[in-house]
Image: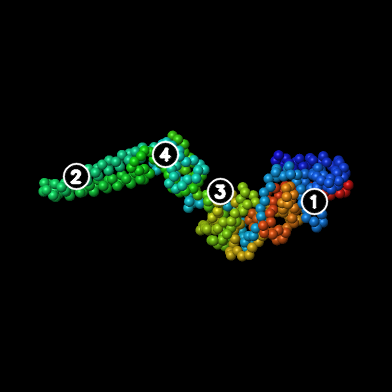
Amino acid sequence: MTAARWIAALALAGLACRGDRGDRHDEASHGSAGHGGAGEAAGSLAQLVGAGDAPRTVRIDPDMIRDLRVTTARAETRASGERVSAPGELQVNQDAYAEVAAPSPARVERIVARAGDEVAAGAPLVVLHSADLGRARAEGDAAGARVDVARKNLERKRALAGERLVAEREVIEAEAALTEASAQAEVAAAALRQLGGSAGGSGLTLRAPVAGTIIDRDVVIGQLAEPSRTLYRIADLSTLWLVAHVFERDAVRVRVGGTGSAAFAALPGRTVDGTIRWIGREVDPSSRTIPVRLDIPNPDRVLRPGMSATVSIPLGDATGAALAVPVAAVQRVGDDWAVFVPRGEGVFEIRPIGRGRDLGGEVEILRGLAVGDEVVVDAAFLLKAEADKARGEGGHDHEH
């Protein structure tokens, strides 16, 4: 059952139970003494417990709690100096990135590596058959043979010259012939290296120029691979570049070496810190922004190039610290700002807090939480809705 259907079911259950509230109230009174709250669960899947200054909690039926997909985060300290929020997107680390293409037109014979594979530098990727490579190898073999002939001829001429059977001029001519043949062999070898081949073997094997993950493969067996077409893209994903687009009035106050934090739409409740490594030297004329690049660690490979982010960047010299939680964890419950603190299976304390500044994907907490306190992030809004609903039902029953 999805969270949306679950909420709809709660609403129908509430309507169905309004006709017998008096009986249900009696059952709850008797059942709470003997069954530790079992009677309460019979009337509603969510109850608001506590009154006056006592902690308030929301109780959710354990059978329904898994449909909420609850995720949590802990309150952490952040730099409290002036900060600016800017949109950004993840990119590959271009210092550890490579695109692989065929050096000349070639036919694909065999695929060795596939998308998603982790490869070491020098690992084989694909085997090609290249007519240009075949000609280059043949020319290299011929040039090598001419060098052998010229060397043997020079040795013979020198031996004959020692016996005064040939003129010294013939020795000089043989030396020049060897030098010319050696130069031609060097040219042939350079052409072979440019095509990625070697003196022996068949076909052309393209190899990974860097270690990393194959993030894209665009090659199939039998395909004609052209030099203008990228066959593989390889990147080391352990560190990514996050490029934020900061308005020029703020970018001039950003400092290289500062620490920014990023919140990702695809990963609610999670923030990642990164180091500011580069600030652009040009202003985008259409948006009036300057790119600011952060290095983002990605040891578990959860982050992916292309993900969008909201980046919180310090301006000037950030000093001091502030307690913060993800913005999705903070909800308006009644007249108070509050967070939901897990207190056991299906039980969540409604903890009033003092809400401070927005810190780019996070909210400053002025009071009500301590460092390390766990709060609900995903499903916090649904818990707020159930708390509001339970408060309304409880007050109505009390009037009867």
Answer whether labels 1 and 3 touch (C-beta < 8 Å): no
Q: How many marks?
A: 4
Mark 1 element type? strand
Name the residue tied to disc 4: 127
Name the residue tied to disc 2: 153
Answer whether labels 3 and 2 touch (C-beta < 8 Å): no
| Residue name at image x 51 percent, y 51 percent | 93
Image mark for residue 49? 1
Q: How far separated are the C-alphas under marks 1 and 2?
A: 105 Å
Name the residue tied to disc 3: 301
For the residue pair 82 and 173, the one nearer the viewer reads as 173
Mark 1 / mark 3, whichever is N-terminal: 1
Residue 227 visible to the viewer: no
What's under tag 4, amino acid-wise? Val
Residue 232 visible to the viewer: yes
Label 4 Cα crowd, 10 Å radius (few <14 / some 14-19 / many 20+): many
Examine the image and state in which quarter residue 206 appears.
top left
Q: Position of residue 197 (x, y in %)?
A: 36, 43
